[in-house]
Amino acid sequence: MITVKSFEFNYFAVNTYVLHDETGDGVLIDCGCFRKAEEEELTNYITSNNITLKHLLCTHLHVDHVFGNEFVHRTFGLKPQAHKADDEGLPTPLEQARKFGIMDKVRAVKIGKYIVGNDVIRFGNSELVARLVPGHSPGSLIFYNQKNGFAIVGDAIFNRGIGRTDLWGGDRDLLVAAIKDKILSLPDDTILYPGHGPSTNVVSESLNNPFLVI
């Protein structure tokens, strides 16, 4: 059984997720911790639950989702894993941060491993399957666990919304098509944990998301 713990971090209210199973092994997804207190909150949860982090995963490489990558690399020795299309197709986090005037807190960490669609990420007795859902960014990924019936979906889809497509490499038509193909095709009761805001599920978004219901 996988435990999913969410934290809301930084100015952009990014959802950072820690997943771990009964073995104590876990993964960290979209580490957005920005302030010292946020770093301490995350570390305290990991240490108090005796979690051994095996992977630092990125649904995409927009700066608000990667603020904490350097901290995680320094503290836990993990390098981020992401899709090559984002690593090569987006401005660096520092260049993105200049847009928001927050350069002082951005430290670059090179991607340690590229993830492609259908890759399987294993930790403990558990696994996540990566699905490529481009449109919000060129290399946006979701991470799906069939056994426990959930997906970490980044900024591809939200509760009654979809990711913005006016940033670097965004494409609304591509995003809508990818959501329908790679997310709404999951079982109806699949819980969707987004990059911002509350969780939802596949059937709710299939029936009620105004950006997807025609």
Image (cartoon, rainbow, N blue to C red):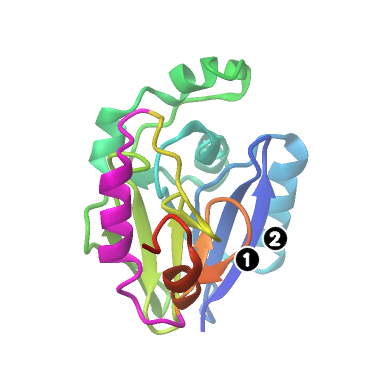
User: Which residue is rendered at x = 64% and y = 41% of the image?
Assistant: 33
Mark 2 sits on what residue? 45
User: Which residue is rendered at x = 57% and y = 39% of the image?
Assistant: 68
User: Which residue is rendered at x = 47% and y = 58% of the image?
Assistant: 210
- Provide the residue span drawn in magenta: 168-189
Q: Are marks 2 and 1 in contact (CB under 8 Å)?
A: yes
Taking the image as drawn, is residue 95 in sight? yes
- Point out which mark residue 173 bears: none
Query: Given the image, on which type of amino acid does mark 1 rest?
Result: Lys
SS assignment at label 2? helix
Does residue 176 sit above or below 102 in this rendering? below
Does residue 168 sit above or below 128 in this rendering? above
| Label 2: how many Cα within 10 Å (few below 14, some 14–19, many 20+) | few
Front: mark 2 or 1? 1
User: Which residue is rendered at x = 36% and y = 62% of the image?
Assistant: 214
Residue 60 on the magenta span: no
**Residue 65, position as x, y percentages in the image:** 51, 41
**Residue 98, position as x, y percentages in the image:** 53, 15
SS assignment at label 1? strand
**Residue 14, position as x, y percentages in the image:** 60, 46
Mark 1 sits on what residue? 5
How far apart marks 2 and 1 lie (CA) works out to 9 Å
| Label 1: how many Cα within 10 Å (few below 14, some 14–19, many 20+) | few
